Amino acid sequence: TLELTPTSRNGIIALMAQAPGVRPNLDVGGSSLNSVPSFHAFGQDGETWQAMEGVATVSPKTGSQGGNYWDYAAIEEARVQTVGSDAETPVRGIAINAIIKSGGNDFHGGAFYAGTNKNFQSNNITAGLAAQGITSGSPIEKRNDVNGELGGRIARDKLWFYGSGRKRREIDDILQCFQPNGSQCIQDQLQGF
């Protein structure tokens, strides 16, 4: 179900976007690829609880953000709870528990790639903005997300394995910033899972 639901495949942000009452980062076309997840539900911010297989992975950050990044493709199923948490959840905010895929007697795997650049981005500079000296928006030079996973058996009915790897990269131009040689300044973000 997670793989068939249209989302940005952006870990915790994509999971929360599918839950009623939850308002995570606004993600338009994968624009929150490297964003720190924000947790908002029914007007309440913060006090979040994130766990994988029941083991807490809660970030030490405070406020309404959590510096937790999960490989979305490695999640088999997840529960996003907004109100009425049980005794296992020591906070009143959003609680997320994810179950990771596992191996099995049969070999299975998958791959995922998504990417874009400034050629697929529109420009909304009006004549009024151009008259003020604004010549461009915030172009995306490069954005890509690649994932591969494999699971299977080592010993039938006894020992299985599963592994997943993911790499995300985003390079954006920084408006009105130029290097000493006159080239555009860029912001380069890279994440590996």
Image (cartoon, rainbow, N blue to C red):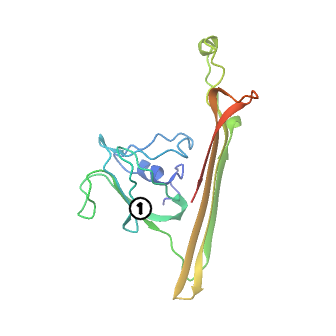
Residue type at mark 1 is Ala
The image quadrant that residue 55 belongs to is bottom left
**Residue 117 against residue 66 in the figure, above or below:** above
The furthest residue to the right: 181
**Residue 44 drawn at (x, y percent):** 29, 42
- Provide residue 75's location: percent of width, then percent of height: 49, 64
Name which quarter of the figure residue 51 lies in: bottom left
**Residue at 40%, 54% in the rendered image:** 59
Q: Helix or strand or loop: what does disc 1 sit on?
A: strand
Q: Quadrant of residue 56?
A: bottom left
**Residue 160 in view (yes/no):** yes
Asked if residue 193 is positioned above or below residue 122 in the image, the reply reads below
The answer to whether residue 3 of the structure is visible from this angle is no
At which x and y percent is residue 60?
A: 38, 53
Question: From the viewer's perspective, is 78 left or right of 81?
Answer: right
Q: In the drawing, does residue 179 fall left or right of residue 32?
A: right
- For the residue pair 103 and 188, the one nearer the viewer reads as 188
**Residue occupying image coordinates x 54% and y 81%:** 160
When the figure is inspected, residue 77 is found, relative to residue 185, above or below; the finding is: below
Q: Which residue is mark 1?
A: 78
Q: Residues within 10 Å of mark 1 (few under 14, many from 20)?
A: some
Residue at the location (53% across, 59% down)?
71
